[in-house]
Image: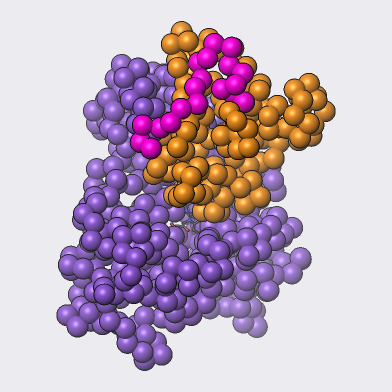
Chain colours: A purple, B orange
């Protein structure tokens, strides 16, 4: 009987466990996580902090999930060491576990900026349910909060703080919010919506120092003689792939852990998926990290199927984000904002009534897009990236506000319907 | 499983499918009341997509590999392995719109009144989905999927 060990009990780990069980009804599956909870939805920690959802509503699976799938779940315990030749993992409590197939679904860990005052009371990160709980326990109504970082995680923290009624300022190093996901025009629409909801935004400074008094936060110095008084600071500079186990075990590691089309790492029988993995991105046509939920699930399903003995290639993934913050809806995917315009063709329908359409092409194929407002067609455009459709004959249509499925060429349109 | 298939050659974009879908998913089951009196107003779970002479009503395909289910981090979208039906639980949906960004058919919509996603549920409990039953041109058929 094969034994499977999964480290990480979140999007990627759960998808993999289910796929393993489908492919191998009998094998022994063990899941280990240093978080003490049954798998929950990480993005929803924002709604949790806001008071809009309970832990119960955040759980990814029903209460009997682990026993009903024959999974032994070891929760609240960290894996501290992997020995690849012995196929043995050591846990923080000294226990050891053996595996035939191993999956690293260890996700990411918050990027900690090298900023003075990081250890003051009132400074938090925002990556786990326990982080959200700690912030919620600490926060009182009159606290003013500064969120350092204007990316997805920073904004989702800011959204929750505002919703709780706390005065909130986001400070962002770059010239705009969500600079890695969006272009200037879409960022401006999001910022306008955020300001209208009462968020304060300071651009061009990532915060130089967190100021304290008696060990507690009292402000953030911006480094140009300005300080923002506050009682709470959230460090939200993004996440780094949690690669330390893999690195120490001698696996090949770059930014994340590169995997092949079967989600297998440089060591046979050892797989990786989710935020920690570098897998094939069909928009960029290269192997890279894609720290979004859909990639973790798709990678996990592929890893699990292959661990259980199938030879299924990964359908590929790409960074695809939908943002529904401050009443503004944005979807963006792939190379939505390429660093250089060299070799790219950009089609834009400038902002109109809070709507915006932008599609990025390369060699006649869509490689990225940003949509603000009307998102119903986003998935159709995303599918064109994935299938690498030559859109030359109808490229102008892509940014038409009325674009939809009917705009696809007849052959593609009909074949896709017939396929399901 | 049986799904709703569009026949685009005979669709004339009259949008009666949308109207009957909305009524079928209203509290009153009555068209006039659903539009005028119900609050929040129900939303049609099918939408006609058109370009020039081409039009078709394209409800959820209930995919075997449902991208929406993979993308939904709220657990609101699930696929029943026994029936093949992909369902959306509006109580769990948080309106993040990730499903809209990954559905290759553009068959998930936003319900603005409720702030949650909306998609075809195949009119569970009816002999035939309301859109199929009420299309005057038989441009929608309820048929067994070639993929089983
Ligand atoms: C605030 C926030 C908002 C987000 N919003 C969105 C969004 O809107 N859309 C979107 O697509 N994505 C969003 N994400 C990203 C999304 O949550 C991740 O892409 C997804 O959770 C990745 O899943 P994963 O399984 O790879 O890893 P993770 O969810 O990071 O889980 C990894 C697990 O492994 C455990 N682990 C790691 N190392 C060890 C070890 N050595 N021993 C034991 N356990 C270990 C960790 O504690 C963790 O529980 C958001 C993330 C955050 C934090
Ligand atoms: S909008 Fe609702 S159903 Fe769609 S992915 Fe988000 S939570 Fe799930």
> Where does residue A128 sit, x and y in percent of width and height?
52, 68
Give the left or right position of residue A74, taking residue A263 as reference. Answer: right
Name which residue lies at 50% across and 15% down: B139
Quadrant where the N terminus of chain B is found in the figure: top left
> Where does residue A228 sit, x and y in percent of width and height?
63, 62
Name which residue lies at 31% across and 83% down: A97
> Where does residue A96 sit, x and y in percent of width and height?
32, 87
Q: Is residue A147 visible?
A: no
Residues shaded magenta:
B130-148
Name which residue lies at 56% across and 22% down: B132
Quadrant where the C terminus of chain B is found in the figure: top left
- Whether residue A69 is in magenta: the answer is no
Name which residue lies at 18% across and 68% down: A267
The furthest residue to the bottom: A94
In which quarter of the view is residue B137 placed?
top right
**Where is A339 relative to A158, above or below?**
above
């Amino acid at each position: 009987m094969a034994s499977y060990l999964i480290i990480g009990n979140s999007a990627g780990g759960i998808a993999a466990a289910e796929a393993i069980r489908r492919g191998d009804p009998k094998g022994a599956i063990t899941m280990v996580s240093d978080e003490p909870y049954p798998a929950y939805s990480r993005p929803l920690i924002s709604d949790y902090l806001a008071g809009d959802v309970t832990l119960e509503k955040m759980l990814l699976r029903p209460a009997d999930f682990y026993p009903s799938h024959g999974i032994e779940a070891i929760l609240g315990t960290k894996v501290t060491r992997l020995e690849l030749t012995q196929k043995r993992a050591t846990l923080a409590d000294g226990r050891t576990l053996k595996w035939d197939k191993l999956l690293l679904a260890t996700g990411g860990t918050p990027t900690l900026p090298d900023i003075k005052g990081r250890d003051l009371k009132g400074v938090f990160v925002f990556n786990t349910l326990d982080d959200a709980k700690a912030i919620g326990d600490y926060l009182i109504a009159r606290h003013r909060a500064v969120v350092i970082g204007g990316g997805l995680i920073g904004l989702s923290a800011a959204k929750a703080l505002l919703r709780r009624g706390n005065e909130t300022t986001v400070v962002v190093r770059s010239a705009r919010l969500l600079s890695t996901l969006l272009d200037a025009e879409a960022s401006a629409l999001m910022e306008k919506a955020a300001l209208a909801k009462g968020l304060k935004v300071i651009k061009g400074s990532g915060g130089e120092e967190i100021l304290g008094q008696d060990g507690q936060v009292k402000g953030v110095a911006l480094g140009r003689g300005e300080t923002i008084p506050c009682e709470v600071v959230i460090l939200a500079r993004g996440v780094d792939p949690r690669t330390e186990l893999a690195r120490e075990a001698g696996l090949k590691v770059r930014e994340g852990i590169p995997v092949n089309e079967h989600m297998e790492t440089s060591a046979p029988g050892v797989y990786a998926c989710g935020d920690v993995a570098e897998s094939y991105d069909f928009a960029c046509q290269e192997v890279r990290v894609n720290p979004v939920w859909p990639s973790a699930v798709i990678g996990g399903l592929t890893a699990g199927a292959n661990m259980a003995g199938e030879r299924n290639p990964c359908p590929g993934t790409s960074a695809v984000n939908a943002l529904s913050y401050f009443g503004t809806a944005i979807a963006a995917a792939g190379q939505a904002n390429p660093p250089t315009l060299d070799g790219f063709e950009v089609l834009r329908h400038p902002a109109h009534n809070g709507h915006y359409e932008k599609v990025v092409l390369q060699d006649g194929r869509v490689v990225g897009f940003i949509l603000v407002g009307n998102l119903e067609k986003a998935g159709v455009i995303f599918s064109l990236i994935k299938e690498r459709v030559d859109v030359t004959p109808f490229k102008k249509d892509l940014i038409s506000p009325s674009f939809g499925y009917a705009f696809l060429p007849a052959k593609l349109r009909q074949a896709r319907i017939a396929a399901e | 499983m049986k799904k709703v298939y569009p026949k685009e050659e005979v669709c004339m974009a009259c949008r009666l499918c949308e109207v009957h879908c909305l009524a079928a998913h209203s509290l009153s089951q009555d068209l006039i009341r659903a539009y005028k009196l119900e609050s929040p107003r129900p939303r049609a779970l099918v939408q006609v997509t058109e370009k020039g002479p081409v039009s078709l009503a394209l409800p959820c395909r209930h995919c075997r590999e449902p991208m929406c289910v993979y993308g939904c981090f709220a657990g609101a979208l699930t696929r029943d392995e026994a029936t093949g039906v992909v369902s959306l639980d509006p109580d769990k949906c948080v309106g993040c719109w990730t499903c809209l960004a990954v559905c290759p058919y553009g068959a998930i919509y936003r319900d603005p009144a409720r702030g949650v996603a909306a998609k075809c549920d195949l009119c569970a409990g009816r002999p035939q989905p309301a859109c199929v039953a009420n299309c005057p041109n038989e441009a929608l058929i309820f048929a067994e999927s070639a993929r089983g």
